């Protein structure tokens, strides 16, 4: 079992806007919970945005193009969580991404990816053309 889990398991990853247009950046938001028995030093989360041409939620049986990977396309400091005591919830993470062309996208977050102690989840979103 992962020692770092999403603080809100029912809605772990959310964009900061209800409607996202293809000409704007948006923030992806999540919070981590240290469910383990030990305190953790600072760790790095990973955000991967994949294009889902067949629409949400997409299929795991199909390869999808990665349009953003925080390990490659971002500053690690934007994805670094502060030290987290056992049983405590971390700060709200909300890095900016985009803009991306209109279409369906999967936002996948892996908590504590650098220490392999974290849970992973995704949210599929629609980006619409700007009017």
Image (spheres, rainbow, N blue to C red):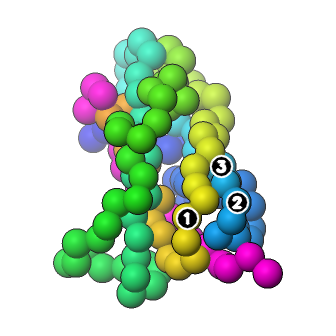
Measuring from the top left, give residue 127's x and y in whole percent. 61, 73
Q: Quadrant of the N terminus?
A: top left
Q: Is residue 64 left or right of residue 123?
A: left
Q: Check if residue 80 falls in the magenta segment.
A: no
Q: CA distance from mark 3 to mark 2?
A: 10 Å
- The kind of secondary structure element at disc 3 is strand
Q: Considering only order in the chain, which callout, 1 or 3, is on the residue closer to the N terminus?
A: 3
| Residue located beneath label 3 in the image | 27
Q: Check if residue 119 falls in the magenta segment.
A: yes
Q: Is residue 71 left or right of residue 127?
A: left
Q: Is residue 4 left or right of residue 28?
A: left
Measuring from the top left, give residue 119's x and y in whole percent. 36, 44
| Residue located beneath label 2 in the image | 24
Measuring from the top left, give residue 66's x and y in whole percent. 34, 60
Q: Which residues are magenta?
A: 114-131
Number of marks present in the image shown: 3
Q: Nearer the viewer, residue 63 or 42?
A: 63
Label of residue 100 in the image: 1
Q: Nearer the viewer, residue 122 or 50?
A: 50
Using the rendered image of the protein, determine whether residue 117 is visible from the camera's viewpoint: no
């Amino acid at each position: 079992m992962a020692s770092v889990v999403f603080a809100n398991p029912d809605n772990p990853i959310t964009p900061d806007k209800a409607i996202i247009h293809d000409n704007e950046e948006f923030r992806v938001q999540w919070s981590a919970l240290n469910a383990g028995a030990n305190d953790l030093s600072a760790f790095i989360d990973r955000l991967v945005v994949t294009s889902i041409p067949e629409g949400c939620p997409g299929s795991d049986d199909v390869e999808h193009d990665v349009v953003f990977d925080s390990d490659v396309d971002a500053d690690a400091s934007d994805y670094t969580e502060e030290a987290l005591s056992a049983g405590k919830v971390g700060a709200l993470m909300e890095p900016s991404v985009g803009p991306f062309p209109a279409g369906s996208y999967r936002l996948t977050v892996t908590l504590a990816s650098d220490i392999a102690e974290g849970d992973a989840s995704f949210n599929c979103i629609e980006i619409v053309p700007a009017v």
